[in-house]
Amino acid sequence: MLTIGFIGTGNMGGALARAAAKEEGNRLLLHNRSPEKAQKLASELHAEVTDQAGALEADFVFLGVKPQMLEQLFSGLRPLLAERDQKPVLVSMAAVTSIRQIREMAGCALPIIRIMPNTPVAIGQGITLYACSPEVSEETEETFLRAMAASGRFIRSEEKYIDAGACISGCGPAFVDLFVEALADGGVACGLPRAMALELAAAMTAGAAGLILETGKHPAQLKDEVCSPGGTTIRGVRALEQGAFRSAAMEAVLAAYGK
Ligand SMILES: NC(=O)c1ccc[n+]([C@@H]2O[C@H](COP(=O)([O-])OP(=O)(O)OC[C@H]3O[C@@H](n4cnc5c(N)ncnc54)[C@H](OP(=O)(O)O)[C@@H]3O)[C@@H](O)[C@H]2O)c1
């Protein structure tokens, strides 16, 4: 039985806890600043609510608080960690916070896995970039990946790529939401009922992305395959190019990275 603690069960921490709950053999310990949030999630997932010290008893401890809250959180965690002979593996999902910074705030050497997940982990379709501190053994990494397998895909990365990667995987769901909403608006403008237009747009987006991942084909090739000469699709592609669609998508990633 593997014990997994969550400190901070908000949007992302909660989504990862939902994924962890799907794997048999994971025992979940949840702690949140406002206890009712942890309590509600615990009832849904048949997990246990605990305090800060209780969460640190776990084998893996996810830190699900906002980056600006970490310093304050660690002022409470530091003495508790110092007392423990057997240190847990800390799993940090905080944006723009390096393994070195987490290590400094923790005040002792311990294994740290830095992850950059996204909200689709809640439905098993997430993509999580991760990097490990030198204290994380191969066996620990494998245990971690098995425990979180229900969240979706994982890509191990050098830590230097995590912030830029987050601008696609972490911010991307919002960009895609905008795209899907706009396609649905176009459908409504053509006379489709709103619900049908939205379902078509969302399912098509998921399917088109799945095709890229499963076939391994370059998106430009897949686009060429559905654009017959003088046909309807190439007209739509031209309209997107006139609206500088690709430039807008690139700039969205760069704008997020700039922040
Ligand atoms: N959302 C995303 O798509 C996404 C993607 C990748 C990474 N992340 C990272 O995930 C982390 C959490 O983001 P979020 O969007 O999930 O934020 P969120 O919904 O605001 O969740 C943060 C949670 O932490 C709790 N909390 C704050 N201080 C605490 C403390 N000292 N002890 C215990 N719990 C505490 C809050 O409790 P209250 O209920 O009392 O406020 C809240 O439930 C951030 O570091 C963010 O960078 C988020």
Image (cartoon, rainbow, N blue to C red):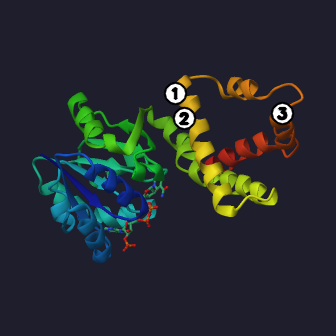
First reached walking from the N terminus: tag 1 or tag 3: 1
Q: Nearer the viewer, residue 60 or 181?
A: 181
Screen quadrant of the C terminus: bottom right
Alpha-carbon span between mark 2 and mark 3: 21 Å
Q: Nearer the viewer, residue 162 or 229?
A: 229
Report ligand 1 position as a quadrant: bottom left
Q: Label 1 sits on what residue type?
A: Glu
Asked if the residue at tag 2 contacts the one at tag 1, i.e. Cβ–Cβ closer than 8 Å, the answer is yes
Residue bearing the label numbered 2 = 210
Dot 1 alpha-carbon crowd within 10 angstroms: few under 14, some 14 to 19, many 20 or more: few
Residue bearing the label numbered 1 = 214
Name which quarter of the figure residue 231 lies in: top right
Alpha-carbon span between mark 1 and mark 3: 24 Å
Return the x and y of residue 7 as percentages of the image width and height: 29, 62
Q: Label 2 sits on what residue type?
A: Gly
Residue at the image position 74 percent from the left and 28 percent from the top: 226
Classify mark 3 as within 8 Å of ligand 1 or not, answering yes or no: no
First reached walking from the N terminus: tag 2 or tag 3: 2
Residue at the image position 30 percent from the left and 53 percent from the top: 62
Residue at the image position 39 percent from the left and 49 percent from the top: 101
Name which quarter of the figure residue 41 lies in: bottom left
Q: Secondary structure at mark 1?
A: helix
